[in-house]
Image: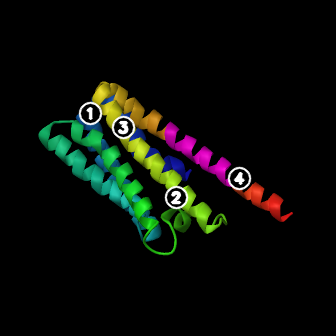
């Protein structure tokens, strides 16, 4: 259920785009992100930093898109968000005792430090690739193709990365358990 809530603004953008076009969809995603942030704050008394950063960037790039009537700004937003996440993950390797990946997932699974660093780098590569792929689609395809890629392509690539991560972790923990057994 949480994944649906997380992707709700993207779905709102997609559906609104199909019905009313880019500028109405841009306004709709700004409103959807604001509602999502408000809902999380009212429910938990705090807002996830990734959601807050994404919401600020949607409002910023979406606002520029609406003011200048140029969709390129909202189209750049996924690249900026993905590259900021990649930079934060990469930076976490050198700041503090744990990578961001370990901080987020460390309560759920147990891995050796070197494996956390490798997993962290996998996510750096994933977010870097997603940002570059977004720009490729923006500059090489029409707007409607980009909207479809934003929902289906980026979501599909993210789910593929989660699957790769699960298989990678399973192969590492299985090998470790076999060595100990």
Mark 4, Cα crowd under 10 Å, few <14 / some 14-19 / many 20+, is: few
Lower sequence index among marks 2 and 3: 2
Q: Is residue 55 above or below residue 164?
A: below
Q: Secondary structure at mark 2?
A: helix
Is residue 162 covered in magenta? yes
Gap in angstroms between the C-alphas marked 1 and 4: 42 Å
Magenta-drawn segment: 156-169
**33 left or right of 152 in image:** left
Residue under numbered circle 4:
170
**46 left or right of 112 in image:** left
Q: Is residue 45 above or below residue 129?
A: below
Gap in angstroms between the C-alphas marked 2 and 4: 16 Å
Could you say where residue 20 lies in the image, as x and y percent from the top left?
28, 30
Q: Is residue 112 above or below residue 71?
A: below
The reply to whether discs 2 and 4 touch (Cβ–Cβ < 8 Å) is no
Q: Name the quadrant containing residue 178.
A: bottom right
The reply to whether discs 1 and 4 touch (Cβ–Cβ < 8 Å) is no
Could you say where residue 123 lies in the image, as x and y percent from the top left?
50, 52
The reply to whether discs 3 and 1 touch (Cβ–Cβ < 8 Å) is no
Residue under numbered circle 1:
22
Could you tell me which residue is drawn at 41 percent across and 32 percent down? 149
Mark 3, Cα crowd under 10 Å, few <14 / some 14-19 / many 20+, is: many
The reply to whether discs 2 and 3 touch (Cβ–Cβ < 8 Å) is no
Residue under numbered circle 2:
120
């Amino acid at each position: 259920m949480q994944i649906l809530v997380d992707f709700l603004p993207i779905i709102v953008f997609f559906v609104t785009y199909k019905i009313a076009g880019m500028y109405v969809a841009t306004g709709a995603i700004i409103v959807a992100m604001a509602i999502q942030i408000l809902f999380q704050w009212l429910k938990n008394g705090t807002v996830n930093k990734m959601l807050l950063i994404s919401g600020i960037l949607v409002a910023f790039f979406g606002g520029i898109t609406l003011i200048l009537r140029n969709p390129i700004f909202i189209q750049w937003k996924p690249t900026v968000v993905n590259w900021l996440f990649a930079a934060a993950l990469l930076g976490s390797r050198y700041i503090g005792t744990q990578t961001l990946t370990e901080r987020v997932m460390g309560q759920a699974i147990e891995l050796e430090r070197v494996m956390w660093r490798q997993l962290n780098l996998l996510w750096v590569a994933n977010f870097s690739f997603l940002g570059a792929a977004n720009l490729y689609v923006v500059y090489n395809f029409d707007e409607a193709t980009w909207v479809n890629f934003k929902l289906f392509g980026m979501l599909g690539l993210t789910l593929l990365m989660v699957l790769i991560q699960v298989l990678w972790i399973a192969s590492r923990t299985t090998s470790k358990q076999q060595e100990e057994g």
